[in-house]
Image: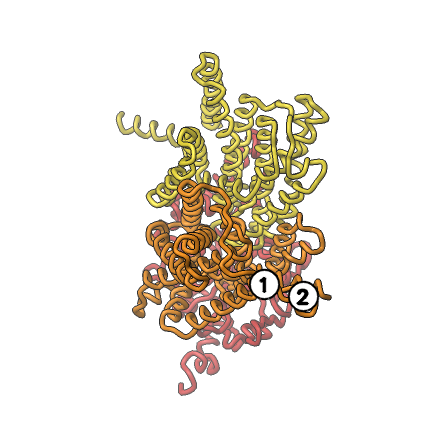
Chain colours: A yellow, B orange, C red
Amino acid sequence: MKANFKYNLVWLIIMVAGFYLMNTLILVGVIDSFIENMLVTIGINIILATGLNLIIGFAGQFSLGHAGFMAIGAYATAIVTQTASTPGGFYASIFIGIVISIVAALIVGVPTLRLRGDYLAIATMGASEIIRILINNMKITGGAAGMFNIPQFADWPTVYIMVCVTTIIIVNFIHSRAGRAVKSVREDEIAAEAMGINVTKWKLAAFVLGASTAAVAGSLHASYLQTIAPNDFGIMESISILIIVVLGGVGSITGTFVAAVVLGVLDTVLQNFGALRMVIYAAALILIMIFKPSGLLGTWELSIKKIFSRSKRKERVES
Amino acid sequence: METFFQQIINGLSLGSIYALLALGYTMVYGIIKLINFAHGDIYMLGAFWGYYVINVWHFNFISALLSAMLVGAASGVIIEYFAYRPLRHSPRITALITAIGVSFLLENGMSYLFSSNTRDFPQIIKQVNYHIGGVLISNIQILILVTACVLMVLLQLIIKKTKMGRAMRAVSVDPDAAELVGININWTISFTFALGSALAGAAGVLIGLYYNSIDPLMGMTPGIKAFVAAVLGGIGSVPGASVGGFIIGILETFVQSIGLSAYKDAVVYFVLIVILLILPAGIFGKNTKEKV
Amino acid sequence: MSKLLQVENLVKNFGGLTAVSNVSMHLDNNELVALIGPNGAGKTTLFNLLTGVIPASSGSIVLSGENGTYPLNGKPAYKIADMGLSRTFQNIRLFKNLSVLDNVLIAMTSKFKEGFIPTIFRFPSYYKTEARLVAEAKKLLAIFELTDDVDVLAKNLPYGTQRRLEIVRALATKPQILFLDEPAAGMNPEETANLTQLILKVQHSFHITILLIEHDMSLVMNLAQRIYVLDHGSLLAQGTPDEIQANPAVIKAYLGEEA
C-alpha cells in the first residue's frame, strides 16, 4: 500500500514538473506560439492514440474508425459552445461529446465486434465514414463547410491536464482486473470465455472507453483550432492515429507517447521542405517499419515500480 | 423501367472498374493476408502512363492498355520486393502501415514530380452514344465492360488452369506446405502482385477514358471502395471480388439516381456492415471456425 | 439424492455428421471419472458441449446446486464457468503473452468485483481487492510449485509446466467440476506419474469432481472410480475400471474386429 503511494507520488511529481517546465519555457520565450501549437497537436494525438492502442494493442480489436468518435466530440463542443460560450459550456460540451460517443460506440460495437481482424477494421471504418457523412449533410453542423469561430476555451494547460487525466484513466484501466480481462480476450477468446470472462462485454468496454477519450480529443481539437470541417475526420485521420499506435509499438502506451512526439516534431520540421514534406514523411514511415517492425518501443513500458525494484535489487547486490 | 436499365448500365460500367481493382486486393490478400493499401495508387500510375504514351508517343487504345498493364505489373512487383518482402514475418499490422506509407509515397511523389493538377485524359476513342430501347449506352461503356469481363475471364483461366495458378492457390492455403512440395514462394507472390497490379493498370486507363480526368490522388477513394468490394465479396475469393465490385457500382449509381448522392458512400458502407453481420466473411468467403 | 451433473440424451450434429449422439451420463460429488474412447470418438466435442464452447443440438445438461437445479444448455461458456464448470484444453490454450500470475488472476476476474470508478482513480478499496486477489493466486500457485515462475510469460514455460498451469488456472475459477482434456498428452512416464499424484491431490484438497479424457490407460485405471467409454459419438460402456477392462465391446472398439 505504501509502495503504491510512492509510485503514484512520483508520477504526480513528474506531471506537475512537466507542467511547470512548459510554463517556464513559454514565459522565457523558448516555446513560441508556433512550438506551442505543435505541442498541443501532439497532446491531442496522444489522447487519440492511447485510446486506440487500448482497443488495438490491449483488446486486440482492429478498429479503423477512431476519427468518427473524434468528430462527435469536436462537433458537440463546436455546437454547444457557440450558444453557451462559457468555460462551463465548454466542459458541459466535453461531457455531451463523451455521452454521444459512448452511445455511438455501443451502436457500432455491439453488432460489429463479433467480426474478426480485417473485417472488423473495414466495418468500423465504414461506421466512422457514416458518422462523417451524416455530419456532412446536417444543418446544425454547418454541412461540408464546417464550423468557424468556435470560441477558444482549450489552451495548452487544458490540453496538458486532459492528456494526464485520459492517460491515467487508460493506464489504470489496463493495469487492473479489467485490463487483464481485456488482454485475455486478445490472447485467446475461447480460453477467456472458459475462464468466466464475458468476452463481448470486455471487448465493448475497451471500445467504449477508447471512443470516449477520442471524443475528448475531438472537443479539444475543435476548441483549440476554432475551425472544423467534416473532412478533418475522414479515413485519413483514422489512419494517421493508427500510424502513431503502430509506430510506437502496439501494446505500449509509452511507445504511443514517443511516436506522437516523434511524428509531431517530424511534421513540424518537414514544413520547411514544402512539397517534398509528404514524400519524406512517407519514406520515413516505410523505413521505420522495415527496420523496426514491432514499432519504436515494441511492448516496452516505462514503469516507476520497475525502476524502483531494480535499484533496490542493485543495492542488495552491492551490500 | 427505362431509367432502371439505364442505371444498371451505368452501374455495371462503374462496377467493372471497381471489380478490376478489387481483384488485385483480393489476390494479394489471399496470398499474403495484406491489405495492399497502395493498390489504388498503381491504378493511378496506370492512368498516368496511359496519359503519357497516348499524348507523347501517340499510342492507340490497345497498346496504351497493354503497356499500362505492364507498367502496373512492374510497379507491383517492385513494391512487393522492396517494401513488403522484408516484412513477411512481421506482425500484419506493420505490413499494413508500410503499405499505407507506400501509398503516401506514390501519391505525393507523383504530385511532387508532375504537379497535383487535374489533367484531361486524351480521348483516343470518339464517344458514340447508342439508344437501345430508350437506354443510352456509349461505346466507351461497352468497351469498359467488355475489357473488364475479358480480363476477369483470363484471370480465372490463369488461376484455375495454369501451373502458376495452382501454385498461387497452394500458397494462399498454406505457404509452408507449398514450399515443402517445391513451390517457389517468392516467385509465386511476385507473380500474384504482377497479375493484380496489371489489372489495376488496365483499370487506370479505362477510368481515364470514362471520366476523362486524372490526378495523383485519384486512386485513394476508388482504392478504398474496391477494397470494400473485395471484403463484401469475401476477401480472397476471385468471383467474390467481381461480384462485390458490381454490387457497389450498381448500388452507388442507384442511390445517386434517387437523389441521395450526398449519402452515396454512407449507403455503401451501411450495406457492407449489414452484409458482414449476416455473412461475417463476405458473400463468397469461407467462414472458418476455430477448432478447440 | 440428485446427481451433481446430469446429462440426458445429448446430441451434436455438424451438418450431416453426428459427433455426439444420445449421450446420457452423470457425475456425483467429489468423484473422479474418466472418459475414454478411440481417436475421433467425440470426447473433446462432448467436453465442448458440457462447458458451453459449442451449443448442443438437443438434449439437456443440468447442474444441481444447494438451492436447486440449473439447466446449462444454451448458456454462454462464461456463465457456465461462473456456475462452477471449469476446464483445460487438449492443445494448451494459455494466455501466452501474459505472465503466469496474470493467467491465474484472469480466471478470478468474475469472483472479485471492483467498480470502474474505484479502479480508474485507484481508491484504497482497489488496492485492497487487488492485494487479496494476488495473495489468493499466489497461494494457489504455491500449491503447484509455480511460485518461482509467477513473472514468467506463459509461453516461456516448459511444456509440462504449461499443462500444470492450465490446471491451476482452471482451479482459480473455483470450480465444482473440473474437466481435464488429455492432461498427460506429450508427457514422459515420470511426468505422468507426478501428474497422477497431482490430480489426486487436487481432488482431495479442493473437494471437486473431475472428469478426465485420457489415452494413457495406466493413468486412467489408477485414478478413475468410474469410466465412460465413447465410440463413434455414442456411449459404448460404463462402469468401474475392472468392468471396463473385461468388457468385450470395449476391447473390440480399441483393438478392431479381429481381436
Q: Secondary structure at mark 2?
A: strand
Query: Is residue C197 visible from the viewing direction of this image?
Result: no
| Of labels 2 and 1, the one closer to you | 1
Q: x%, y% of residue B231?
A: 54, 58
Q: Nearer the viewer, residue C64 or C186?
A: C186
User: Vertical placement of C132 versus C245: above or below?
Assistant: above
Question: What's the distance in space between the residues labelled 2 and 1, CA to CA?
Answer: 14 Å
Side of A134 where B60 appears, left or right: left
Residue carrying label 1: B128
Task: In the rendered structure, find residue B135 and report the number of the disc placed on it.
Answer: 2
Q: Amino acid at mark 2?
A: Val
Number of on-image labels: 2
Query: Is residue C8 visible from the viewing direction of this image?
Result: yes
**Chain assignment, label 2:** B
**Other residues around mark 1 within 10 Å, as few (<14) / some (14–19) / many (≥20):** few
Q: Nearer the viewer, residue A250 or C236?
A: A250
Q: Quadrant of the C terminus of chain A?
A: top left
User: Vertical placement of B10 versus C236: above or below?
Assistant: above
Q: Are marks 2 and 1 in contact (CB under 8 Å)?
A: no
